[in-house]
Image (tube, grey):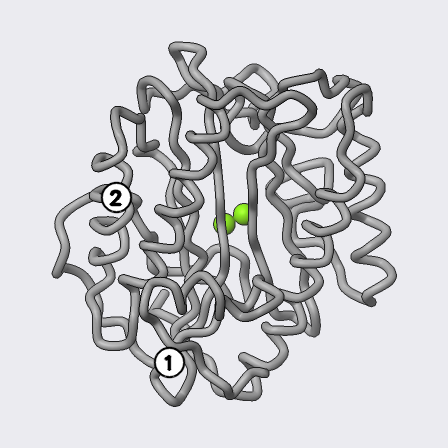
Amino acid sequence: MPIQIKTLDQLKVMRRAGLVVAQMHQVIRDEIKVGMRTDALDVIAAAVIKRAGATSNFLNYHGFPAVICISINDEIVHGIPGSRIINDGDLVSIDCGAIIEGWHGDAAFSIGVGTVSAQDQRLMDICEESMWRGIAAGENGAKLTDIGSAIEQYTNSQGTFGILREYGGHGIGTEMHQEPHVLNFGKAGQGPEITPGLVLAIEPMITSGSERTKVLSDDWTVVSVDGSRGAHFEHSYAICPDGKAFVLTAVDGGRAQLGRLGVEISELLR
Ligand code: MG
Ligand code: MG
């Protein structure tokens, strides 16, 4: 499949989908508590989707049974909500998405619940910052692998972490997962050029130990082989027709975080 280039009108619909995802994130951040079952958060997220007149792109995706992925501690991504109770000190990663008029949004975050260890907080902070560095590197006219290179360089500059190899970011539009695949590591200056109309989901996944993972017998949950904890952050961002970036799944379009990194966001989707 060729890379799907979106018009401004299509990006406007994707922005609406992105704001539904942002709202799901906000509600989950507000509601997540020690002692809660993980499937209670799925119910809350489903209510946001319904209220917004959107549909879920996670539910029934290759048979996935819920509207969010929830992954705890050594689980890094693709965990299934269920009867598991969230404990004090858990590092919880939430990934979810929404569809509006056929256009998809997709974003993820990690959060410490209750008493968060300094080591976990640092793991999350580095993962999140690497995502912003990746988006900032993926500006109009850059090459695709500039993104993964920025993510890897920043992460490695902060210490020893495992950057997952088997999973990465992706194009997004009329399907949740489109070309191109976006690695979270590698050499800069390669791959297709980043141009207006491109929309990418950037999603670094790192652990405090090894990058090696395995999939549990539920056929979904990805855990670290060495038991180390994982973090996962994701945003979907567009290059607008004016050549400027806009983060579709961030309430402020990425203004604060990208501005800090010297990247001016587009005004076309505001
Ligand atoms: Mg994604
Ligand atoms: Mg996602």
Q: Would you name the residue on which mark 2 appears?
A: 154
User: Is residue 235 or residue 199 the one in the foreground?
Assistant: 235
Which residue appears at 32% of the width and 24% of the height?
A: 211
Q: Would you name the residue on which mark 1 appears?
A: 244
Residue 97 image position (x, y, % from top left): 64, 53
Q: Is residue 118 left or right of residue 94?
A: left
Which residue appears at 24% of the width and 61% of the height?
A: 144
Task: Please tell me whether mark 2 sits on a helix, a strand or a loop.
Answer: helix
Please give the count of numbered marks on the rendered protein: 2
Query: Which disc is residue 176 wearing?
Result: none
User: Is residue 215 or residue 207 the one in the foreground?
Assistant: 207
- Whether ligand 1 has any atom under 8 Å from the Cβ at mark 1 is answered as no
Q: Check disc 1: other Cα within 10 Å, few if <14, some if 14-19, many if 20+.
A: some
Q: Check disc 2: other Cα within 10 Å, few if <14, some if 14-19, many if 20+.
A: some
Question: Quadrant of the image for the N terminus?
Answer: bottom left
Q: Is residue 128 left or right of residue 158?
A: right
Amino acid type for the residue under numbered disc 2: Tyr
User: Is residue 159 or residue 177 the one in the foreground?
Assistant: 159
Q: Is residue 170 left or right of residue 248?
A: left
| Occupied quadrant, residue 70 | top right
Which residue appears at 85% of the width and 58% of the height?
A: 50
| Occupied quadrant, residue 52 | bottom right
Q: Which badge, 1 or 2, comes first in the chain's sequence? A: 2
Amino acid type for the residue under numbered disc 1: Lys
Residue 236 image position (x, y, % from top left): 49, 61
